[in-house]
């Protein structure tokens, strides 16, 4: 990860998510995903963080589209949508 | 995360490279995938992840989307699988 300055502005949760492989982590590990949102996501089959990442990639890493989807289809709040899309965007920037 | 050389090479394949750069996906299949919106290698990776990394489901999807045969699908599957081993 580059730039300790950027890291300082990250939430501890985001920093943790970016600092190690996501492997088989549950979707609740994604920054911005509250317990309620996690339940909704799991109900829709998005049980793991990597599956949500897959959805983000399928949407061509378009944050606006992803946010719209997670709000409309999964009941996320705007804040949750922004935080989770930012988290996945940051992950892609680090690993893709 | 320390990345080995191979890991970096695999990672670069998914950076922003066109879908035709994936193993098993030549010009013809690549064009069909692009027409369906799967224009970059990372979008195919996304599909693979959404299918929960299941090889059979991935083949079904690839067959339906661009008419890939079993061998092409196997070759193509190897790519995201390797990437997952390195990065996930």
Image (cartoon, rainbow, N blue to C red):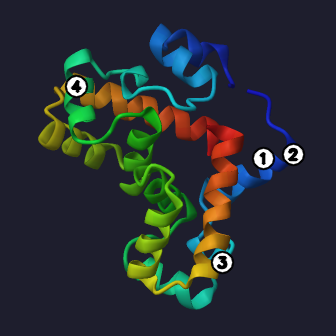
Q: Chain of mark 4?
A: A
Q: Nearer the viewer, residue B56 or B23?
A: B56
N-terminal-most mark, 1 or 3: 1
Secondary structure beneath dot 3 equals loop
Subunit that carries the residue with mark 1: B
The residue lying at 41 percent from left, 42 percent from top is A51
Question: Circle 3 is placed at which residue position?
Answer: B24
Residue B5 is labelled as 2
User: What residue is drawn where x is 16% and y is 26%?
Assistant: A77
Left-right relation of A46 to B60: left
Q: Residue at x 65, y 14 (%)?
A: A4
Is circle 1 on the same chain as circle 4?
no
Helix, strand or loop at disc 4?
helix
Upstream in sequence: badge 3 or badge 2: 2
* Numbered label attached to residue A39: 4
> Which residue has dot 1 on it?
B8
Q: Nearer the viewer, mark 2 or mark 4?
A: 4
The residue lying toward the viewer, choosing from A87 and A51, is A51
């Amino acid at each position: 990860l580059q730039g300790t300055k950027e890291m300082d502005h990250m939430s501890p949760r985001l920093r943790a998510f970016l600092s190690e492989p996501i492997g088989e982590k549950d979707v609740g590990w994604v920054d911005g995903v509250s317990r309620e949102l996690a339940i909704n996501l799991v109900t829709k089959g998005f049980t793991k963080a990597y599956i949500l990442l897959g959805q983000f990639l399928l949407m061509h890493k378009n944050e606006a589209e992803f946010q719209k989807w997670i709000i409309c289809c999964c009941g996320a709040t705007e804040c949750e949508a922004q935080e989770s899309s930012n988290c996945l965007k940051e992950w892609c920037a680090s690993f893709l | 995360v320390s990345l080995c050389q191979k890991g970096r090479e695999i990672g670069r394949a998914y950076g922003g490279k066109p879908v035709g750069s994936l193993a098993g996906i030549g010009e013809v299949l690549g064009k069909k995938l692009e027409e369906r919106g799967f224009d970059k290698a990372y979008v195919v990776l996304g599909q693979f992840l959404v299918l929960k990394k299941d090889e059979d489901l991935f083949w079904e999807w690839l067959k339906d989307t661009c008419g890939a045969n079993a061998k092409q699908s196997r070759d193509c599957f190897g790519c995201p699988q390797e990437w997952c081993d390195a990065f996930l």
